[in-house]
Amino acid sequence: MEFGIQTGQQHRSYDEILSLWRLAERLGYRYGWLYDHLVPVGGDLDGQVHEAWTLLASLLARTETIRGGVLVSCVMFRHPAVLAKAAATVDHASGGRLEFGIGAGWNAWEADLYGVPFPPLRERLERLDEAIQAIRTMWDPSKKNFEGRHYKVSGAHSAPLPRQSPHPPIWVGGFGKRIPGIVARQADGWNAVFLSLAEYRERLDRMRRACEEAGRDPATLRLSFGQRVSVNRDAKVAEERARLQYERHGVPFDEQIRKRFIFGAPLQVVEQVAVLRDLGVEQFILWHEPPFDAEAEDQLREFAETVVPLLR
């Protein structure tokens, strides 16, 4: 199992985000992730948010080993041909360290604020399906064109191709009625976040059935899982930190939230993450997104020093 961080770029300065990524890199985290939002999704909704792809390019240019991506790029924010071109550029600029994430998006309110079309979910999923096909066309020198209901691209004019061969890993995030089929046919990996263990097992079972129905070996689908974590040598301190992350923002730390938060002493956290590892999760992502983000630097260190060695 490898480990990553997610630093949703709201309510943080550029320098603070860069500092977290560099710290994660020094501590041995393999992956760094951003989100794709135009306004904050927590805390002060008028607060600052850095645009995902320009920020990602800068962070990868100012780090050396960490692999980076956006979990996940909203299909409605950029035409897939332009996104494919941008991603290929970032892959070259980073020396082949791009992880490519894409999804249907969910925040209609922010799209409306920016005047971005945001059709119903059914159409967004249709667009997601087509967008990945269009992006694969742009990245495959054996393909010349793609024409679907929503998108039309010419692969003949897509140079440069990504540095990674055959292309950067394609991750699809989220879950819905049509997502398993899209993932099974087109994605290299599937990302899920903020689920209880029981919820994740059920959705993973459905994802693996979709792979089988598509004629794909489920074992070829890479899995990543993101969760908030609070770890301390004193389990009571860890639980209190977890509770305060919610209650100080008016969200009760109820049973449902507790099941969707990993907290405790190092061995307790190891036990919970190990269950995910045994289910096939190859990448565990620590979610550090303000304002639900108590002591991010401390937690990155604590997890790296006390939990990671016991999971490898």
Image: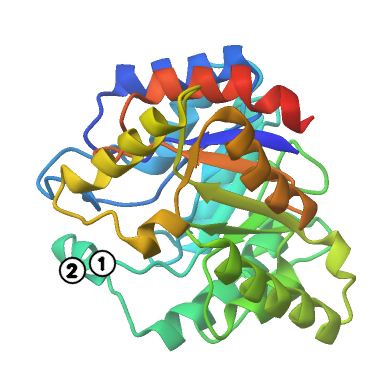
Three-letter code, disc 2:
Asp
Q: Which residue is mark 2?
A: 112
Label 2 crowd bin: few (<14), some (14–19), many (20+), radius 10 Å:
few
Task: Name the element at disc 1.
Answer: loop
Q: Residue at x 51, y 38 (%)?
A: 286
Image spot of residue 305 (x, y percent): 61, 17
Q: Is residue 169 visible in the rendered structure shown here?
A: no
Q: Residue at x 39, y 42 (%)?
A: 52
Image spot of residue 171 (x, y percent): 63, 56
Residue 271 figure quarter: top right
* Side of 230 relative to 113 (left or right): right
* Side of 269 relative to 247 (left or right): right
Q: Is residue 101 visible in the rendered structure shown here?
A: yes
Residue 242 higher or lower than 208, as above or below: above
Q: Residue at x 47, y 25 (%)?
A: 232
Q: Which residue is mark 1?
A: 116
Seen from the viewer's position, the closer of residues 41 and 108 is: 41
Q: Residue at x 50, y 22 (%)?
A: 233
Tell me how far mark 1 sits from mark 2, CA to CA. Answer: 6 Å
* Side of 112 relative to 206 (left or right): left
Three-letter code, disc 1:
Val
